[in-house]
Amino acid sequence: MDYKNASLSPEERAKALLSLMTLEEKVAQMDIIRGVEFSTKPHKLYHCAVHTDSEILEDKLKEALGNRGIGFIHDCYSHPVLFNKLQKFVVENSRLGIPCMFTGEALHGILWPGATVFPVPLALASSFDRKNVNTIGRAIARETRALGMHEILAPNLDVAREPRWGRVEETFGEDTYLSSELAYQIVTGEQQDGNIERPDAVVCEPKHYCVHGIPENGINCAQARVGRREIEQSYLPVFETAIKKAGAYNVMACYNAIDGEVVLSSEYYLTDILRKRWGMKGYVRADWGSVVRLVNRHFTAATDEDAICDCVNAGLDMQGCCDYDTKTWEETIVKNVKSGRIPMERIDDAVLRVLTIKFKLGLFENPYTDENLHESVIRCEKHLTASHEAAKKSMTLIKNNGILPLEKGKYKKIALLGPSANRQRLGGYSSVPDGYELRSVLQELRELLGDEVEIEYCNGCGIPKDLHVETQEGQPHLVEVYDEDEKECIEDAVKIAEKSDIVIIVGGDNTFTSSEGHDRADLKLAGKQRELVEEVAKTGKPVVLVLENGRAVDLQVESGICDAILLAWFGGETGAKAIAETLVGLNNPAGRLPVSFPQDSYRIPCYYTVLPNNTEVMFEGSRRPRYEFGFGLSYTEFEYSDLKLEKQSELDYKVSVNVKNTGKVKGDEVVQLYVNDKVSSIITPLKELKGFERITLDVNETKTVEFTLGFDSFKLLNKDFEWVVENGEFQILVGASSNDIRLSETIKIER
């Protein structure tokens, strides 16, 4: 049989195998099951994981799969022993011996308990460091594949311009260019430059295609109200980069509708753009429980059968979990193929895509995973170092009156306060620590400062983890439930602060205030954290605020009364160490904001590429951000000089600028280049990022930073929806943030 001939190409073998399959076997390849439901021993720490010594429920599997096989198995985070048991059953109990593909979530580390937890993508974006992101991608892939999983439901490439949305932390921020550049790095890293047959590579599935980061009211899965030009200019380019340039095989379609059109049942989005325009090689997967939403949320389908047919006919290749059981999904498709409602060609196309990737992965020759390799890969020294370096690079200092770094010997007694001072936060989609201690800022600071400095700790307040109605004096009240017992209170924290030389407050978010499905109407620090800051500040002691946050924060009060504010985001398992090292000056912060911070919770939207308006002022004040995109401070200073533009061809320019460290310590600077199309046929932002470089400079060292500009740097989508570069003047702006432009030159394009 030709499909077993390894000398043929994956595409040829897939076609040969497809020709031998029954309709029922084909449709099974478009299906997915949850492995934990077919295992005897779920993991004690995570309900979607399975213990290594678990057995599989063979009778239950046989009943569910028959001899058809299955395309994918998800929610089965385990060691290779268990994966091999499942794979052996699937191969040996399907007529044609087609292996399944194991699927996992790996947004910032695979979710197997005990795997390395890397900083969240928003933290990686704040590093503005391409190599850093690529390194993390390769590490995630190694751990995922070593455990026995072949594809990941990542990266999240939503352009996040709605700060109330709970999933901002999963993204690379608000900017199209930054997100595109980092999309390329994470995908090529995880797919090992497209060599997915390697035992340390995985198949990527960028999500949530394609406009999911601006849901109405910030509510997850809500509709997006956005025009075609904005879609083409701001949202599609990130996915296009991931698919056409980086080589991502697949996408996960978003839950929502765009301008009233449900993406999951849109032939325009799933077929015309993905397949015809971009030539996507792989398949489209539905997000978890999203097909049924056509019936019970979007109301575009009357029945489940209608919803399934609409989606499959539009270009959906497989369901996610939590929509339909295998019997309902598969039998519905089979029935409608036989009736002619779903064309057989549509099924063949979907299955061919699945089979081709399985052949590319080498699963037919090597369906099983080395059962010992993971021991030297999971949380290896190389990965822990990469995670820690990424956490340090993500540290973003947005206020400092000179108090940081802490001067050695100046402070004999430190008050360390706040709900995250003795508890490291990891963010959503994080592996559960297993077999190691998750250290806190309290532990790390005590270790760094030693006995010479007394550190007195008090949480002062907690971070809410839930809301419930409680009857008090016969009346219902909405009460916050906190994520840990509040043994101390704000009054205790104030007493400790009064006896100290300096106060460090560590707070921010948890997975209730920032994560999937946890959207906010108010961006200020949750619970009593603002009150804690205010009361402690009244003592007159210097206050340093450290935030482990997953989105932009309303800091209208804190920015006025704190002496320094350090954003640590969710920095992975060694995030606390990175915070401590930054506070004492062992790490010079150079993170830059990948999202704008609004003046307050209500002056939104707030992103730097908002179109020019007739006013910059609201009744309450400026609509400009409090802290703008690209902003971040350092413990040193940088001087920009000698901006040069050299025309290479009609639309190609080389730009160079000299940057000098004029301060007293070594540091990194993120040099940013923006372009402003001064007069254009359609309205364009006043500036857009078109280049950035993170550089390291010793004291008094100067480096020349070079950028290349071309068609993509100057283009716009004109009135006829054609990508063109119009004649006219373009400002080339170089600086340290979107608002801190140090040098500029104007070029004139005439053709």
Image (spheres, rainbow, N blue to C red):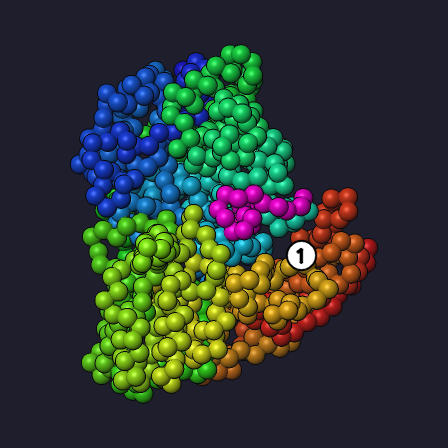
**Which quarter of the figure has residue 674?**
bottom right
Extreme-front residue of the structure: 474
**Circle 1 — which element?**
helix
Left or right, 340 with reference to 397: right
Extreme-top residue of the structure: 339
Question: At 26% across and 53% down in the image, what residue appears?
Answer: 433
Q: Quadrant of the N terminus?
A: top left
Question: At 34% across and 75% down in the image, what residue appears?
Answer: 504
Q: Main secondary structure of the magenta part?
A: loop
Image coordinates for residue 189, horizontal then vertical, percent: 44, 49
Extreme-right residue of the structure: 751
402 versus 471 height, above or below: below
Q: Nearer the viewer, residue 222 or 428?
A: 222
Q: Which residues are magenta?
A: 209-228
Determine which residue is flagged by label 1: 713
Q: Nearer the viewer, residue 733 or 197?
A: 733
User: Could you tell me how many numbered marks the image carries?
Assistant: 1
Q: Nearer the viewer, residue 620 or 439?
A: 620
Does the stretch in magenta take in 195? no
Extreme-bottom residue of the structure: 410
Q: Quadrant of the C terminus?
A: bottom right
Image coordinates for residue 474, horizontal then vertical, percent: 32, 55
**Which quarter of the figure has residue 621?**
bottom right
392 versus 213 height, above or below: below
